[in-house]
Image (spheres, grey):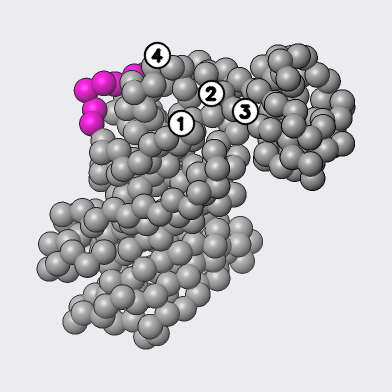
Amino acid sequence: MRQYRYIVSQADSGFQLQTYLRKRQGYSKRLIIQLKHGGITVNGDHRRMVDPVEAGDVIDIELAGDPIKLIPNPELSVPIIYEDADVIVFDKPADMPVHPSATYYDDTLGNYFAALFLEEQIAFRPINRLDRDTTGLCLSAKNTLAAAKVAKTLQKEYVAIVQGQMEESEGVIDKPLIRVPGSIISRKVHPDGQRAVTHYRVIRQLADYAIVAIRLETGRTHQIRVHFAYIGHPLEGDTLYGGRTQYITRHALHCGKLFFKRPEDDTLITLRSQLPEDMALLIGECFW
């Protein structure tokens, strides 16, 4: 159970309670509807959502836990980079899916999360989802309010190792993506797809490949992998999209930086993750 306390300022005096929660504290309509059935008091008393709040009012909220729907697996181990009352950030290894599936049903990041928070009954809410073989920082919120807040401020930076000589030192790939007909996995560039925008900057150009920093404007499935393959520079190791495997046996992509505002007080949090061993060995050093 997560508890929040707010003290109404003079500037917010006269707002309806629901307006205060939505505009000042970031509560969704759905969460406000849930609170109508309990879990909120003003100065210790029940208050309707349409009632006004006054300066100095103390609003207390309790967000109940959620049923654990994933199989807890305490035998797993994933480094935790950051944790507070609202979010937790893992440094996910390769060969670990974020969510369970028919193939991976008890050995995912979600199963490890379920084991960590079984007693507290906290549901798994990953905000940035990584492919099974993409390594790096993965943030999960511990309640619906935190999920809504952090999703608005979260920014990610990836590092990839791509094949060949990059023609430009930086650029934007703005190409729509669609699922390949008959496949549940593969994507491709297609005019009928959803808009997908990838910003990149070449950190270092080596003889046969380049190290690239990437920020996403959109978050489509396989976006980075498909976009770089489309411009003729597939990720090293990415056999699904034309990458070679002589240097690395999985696609060379790592979520190395996260920036977000802490849901409790809007403090800016900046996190970094070092390159995994296989990518660091490929480039000969750890520069991140």
- 210 to the left or right of 282: right
Q: Which of marks 3 and 4 is nearer the N terminus?
A: 3
Q: Are marks 1 and 2 in contact (CB under 8 Å)?
A: yes
Magenta segment boundaries in residue numbering: 71-77
- Residue 37 versus residue 270 in the image, above or below: above
Mark 3 in CB contact with mark 2 (< 8 angstroms) = no
Identify the mark nearer the N-term, 3 or 1: 3
Residue drawn 25% across and 44% down? 93
Q: Which element is circle 4 on?
A: loop
| Residues at marks 3 and 4, CA–CA distance in whole angstroms | 24 Å
SS state under label 3? strand
| Of the two numbered discs 3 and 2 in the rendering, the one whose residue sits closer to the viewer | 3
Residue to which mark 2 is pinned: 2
Dot 2: few (<14), some (14–19), or many (≥20) neighbours within 10 Å? some
Residue 129: quarter of image: top left
The x and y percentages for residue 191 are 61, 66
Image point (39%, 16%), residue name:
118
**Number of numbered discs on residues:** 4
Query: For the residue marked with disc 1, what is the amino acid?
Result: Ala
Inter-mark Cα distance, 1 to 2: 8 Å
Of residues 150 and 226, the one drawn nearer to the viewer in this rendering: 150
Mark 3 vs mark 1, foreground winner is 3
Residue 85: assigned label: 1
- Give the mark toward the camera: 3 or 4: 3
- Residue mark closest to the camera, 4 vs 2: 2
Closer to the N terminus: mark 1 or mark 4? 1
**Circle 4 residues within 10 Å: few <14, some 14–19, many ≥20:** few
Kindly tell me whether residue 29 is visible in this rendering: no
Q: In which quarter of the image is residue 288?
A: bottom left
What residue is shown with label 3?
5
